[in-house]
Image: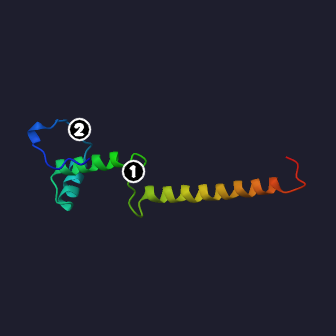
């Protein structure tokens, strides 16, 4: 359940050490979404808990990581097709398995 109306002094506080550059990334995202940095962090955490099966990794189009993921997806599809073909050939009458 999203935290919307609250008195900030009544909430838990937690200090987080951010990797280099992440504070700036959060600031850019917060401004883009018209939120404070704290609200941006809380929103992102809420989203990550909303659907636990949803991937947390965000891949940007045309990034190296995205290309690797697409190559792996294509390879997995090819392997799945090969396994299906192999199963089909083993199931043909007259074959001993």
* Residue at the limit of the structure toward the bottom, as seen here: 62
State the SS at label 1.
loop
Kindly indicate the quadrant of the structure image that contains residue 29.
bottom left
Local packing at callout 1 (Cα closer than 10 Å; few below 14, some 14-19, many 20+) is few
Which residue appears at 17% of the width and 47% of the height? 38
Answer yes or no: do the residues labelled 1 and 2 have beta carbons within 8 Å?
no
Residue 37's tag is none
Q: How is the image coloured?
A: rainbow
Q: Nearer the viewer, residue 29 or 62?
A: 29
Which residue appears at 71% of the width and 56% of the height? 84
| Residue 33: percent from left, percent from top | 21, 60
| Residue 53: percent from left, percent from top | 43, 47
| Residue 20: percent from left, percent from top | 25, 45
Local packing at callout 2 (Cα closer than 10 Å; few below 14, some 14-19, many 20+) is few
Kindly indicate the quadrant of the structure image that contains residue 78.
bottom right
Which residue appears at 41% of the width and 60% of the height? 63
Q: Nearer the viewer, residue 20 or 61?
A: 61
Residue 57's tag is 1
Kindly indicate the quadrant of the structure image that contains residue 81.
bottom right
C-alpha separation, residue under disc 1 versus residue under disc 2: 20 Å
Q: Nearer the viewer, residue 30 or 1?
A: 1
Which residue appears at 23% of the width and 38% of the height? 17
State the SS at label 2.
loop
Disc nearest the viewer among 1 and 2: 1
In the picture of the structure, the residue carrying the numbered disc 2 is 17
Residue 13 vs residue 82: left or right?
left
Residue 53 vs residue 80: left or right?
left
Of mark 1 and mark 2, the one earlier in the sequence is 2
Residue 57, compared with residue 16, is above or below; it is below
Q: How many marks?
A: 2
Q: Nearer the viewer, residue 48 or 76?
A: 48
Asked if one can make out residue 21 in the rendered structure from this viewpoint, the answer is no
């Amino acid at each position: 359940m999203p935290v919307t109306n609250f008195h900030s002094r009544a909430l838990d506080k937690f200090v987080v050490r951010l990797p280099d550059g992440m504070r700036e990334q959060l600031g850019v995202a917060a401004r883009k979404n018209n939120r404070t940095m704290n609200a941006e962090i809380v929103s992102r955490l809420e989203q990550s808990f909303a659907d636990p099966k949803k991937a947390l990794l965000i891949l940007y189009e045309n990034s190296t990581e995205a290309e690797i993921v697409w190559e792996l997806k294509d390879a997995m599809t090819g392997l799945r097709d090969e396994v299906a073909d192999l199963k089909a050939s083993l199931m043909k009458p007259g074959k001993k398995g």
